[in-house]
Amino acid sequence: MSGMLVQKMHAAEGRLAKNDGMIFNIAANYGGQDEILRAVQTLAARAAKGEIAPEDIDEKVFEAALDTADDPPVDLVIRTSGDLRLSNFLLWQAAYAEFWFTKTNWPDFTPEEFVDALVDFAHRKRRFGGLDPSGK
């Protein structure tokens, strides 16, 4: 990542430091598979040291070993650039997320498109992996 991009990211973090509402994650140089492997390795090392029993590793313990341990579950993934794939992004965390796709590339993504995504999301019926009782 370029130094200028890192500076801009740090400046944005500073401006949003007191935000206590919506969480907005931007993943730069991130890979979901790598994150999952690192979490498994951390838990395996703890088990090898006797700090945790393998049978005590459940979803909550596993999620605590992820990079996003303190974040709530992902509700909405906005995928830019017209690609219709996850691209190794938040593989565990996005299990029950809703997706919104746009052909716009990230640098050109506008606040208006962000609002469009949120409005679309607000009209969705979330089932979190369950079936719609009406059969629809």
Image: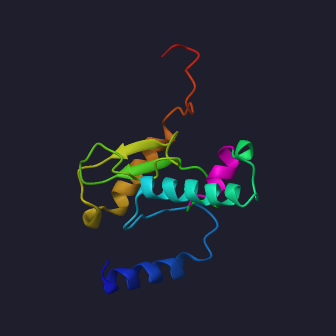
Q: Is residue 59 above or below residue 107?
A: above
Magenta region: which residues? 58-66
- Classify residue 133 by image quadrant: top right
Residue 16 in picture, x, y percent from top left: 54, 75
Closer to the camera in the image, 37 or 50: 50
Closer to the camera in the image, 129 or 52: 52
Q: Is residue 68 left or right of residue 49?
A: left
Closer to the camera in the image, 46 or 68: 46
Q: Is residue 27 left or right of residue 60?
A: left
Visual colour scheme: rainbow
Q: What secondary structure predominates along the stretch shown in magenta?
A: helix
Residue 125 in picture, x, y percent from top left: 53, 32
Residue 127 in picture, x, y percent from top left: 56, 30
Q: Tell me if residue 87 is in the magenta stretch.
A: no
Residue 67 in picture, x, y percent from top left: 55, 62
Q: Tell me if residue 61 is in the magenta stretch.
A: yes
What residue lies at 41% left-to-right and 54% top-to-bottom? 115
What residue lies at 55% left-to-right and 14% top-to-bottom? 134
- Classify residue 112 by image quadrant: bottom left
What residue lies at 62% left-to-right and 76% top-to-bottom? 18
- Marks counted in the figure total 0
- Classify residue 52 by image quadrant: bottom right
The quarter of the image holding the N terminus is bottom left
What residue lies at 44% left-to-right and 58% top-to-bottom? 34
Q: Is residue 17 left or right of residue 54?
A: left
